[in-house]
Image (tube, rainbow, N blue to C red):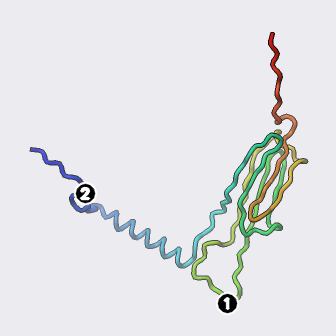
Amino acid sequence: MFEYRSLLDRPFTDPFGWDDVFRGFDRILRDADRDIGLASTGYAPARFDEETDKFVLRVEVPGVAEKDVHVDFHDGVLTVSAERQVTEPEGFTPRRRERGSQKFSRSYALGERADAEKTTAELKDGVLAVSIGKAAVAQKKSIAVKAA
């Protein structure tokens, strides 16, 4: 007769030893995190919105000074780059560092839809807001419908 037993009824044994391998990786990562802190990935969250007469790009850049943010518009490509430098006082060694120096650069291909002359940028409360005016080609046009 067939008897059904769940895998949870008996303890799991790892016949190939993978459990020890994963424990070793976990220990290495924990030690690295403790010793050198978290590494930055160069990533900045962004949001791109379209309004009737403009595009608005908002990029989170906390702790970045205005002089370290660069916005370039060339051949229909908008490039936003920033760099944050974190320096510790002399003789100070952090025990854990979760926010370090960071560089990032991101490009957005807008083509003929954007007007470089109508583009402005503002940095406020750690958020860079780039307002990109739409070219006449990209603006929505309403066409009246006539009954025949």
Q: Residue, x 22% and y 53% (percent of image)?
A: 6
Q: Tell me which residue sits at (78%, 56%) in the image.
A: 129
Residue kind at label 1, given as amino acid type: Gly
Vertical comparison of 24 with 128: above or below: below
Q: Is residue 84 above or below residue 115?
A: below
In this rendering, position of residue 67 left or right of residue 29: right
Above or below, 79 against 11 in this view is above
Q: Which residue is mark 2?
A: 8
**Residue 57, percent from left and from top:** 76, 51
- Left or right of 87 in this view: 34: left
Of the two numbered discs 1 and 2 in the rendering, the one whose residue sits closer to the viewer: 2
Q: Position of residue 49 (x, y in %)?
A: 73, 46
Quadrant occupied by the C terminus: top right
Disc 2, SS: helix
Dot 1, crowdedness within 10 Å: few (<14), some or many (≥20)? few
Q: Tell me the quadrant of the picture where the N terminus can be found.
A: top left
Residue 91 - label: 1
Q: Are marks 1 and 2 in contact (CB under 8 Å)?
A: no
Location of residue 68 in the rendering, given as x and y in whole percent from the top left corner: 80, 67
Percent coordinates x, y for residue 50 in the rendering: 75, 43
Q: Is residue 62 left or right of residue 145?
A: left
The residue depicted at 71 percent of the width and 88 percent of the height is: 90
Q: Earlier in the sequence, mark 1 or mark 2?
A: 2
Q: CA distance from mark 1 to mark 2?
A: 54 Å
**Quarter assignment of residue 36:** bottom right
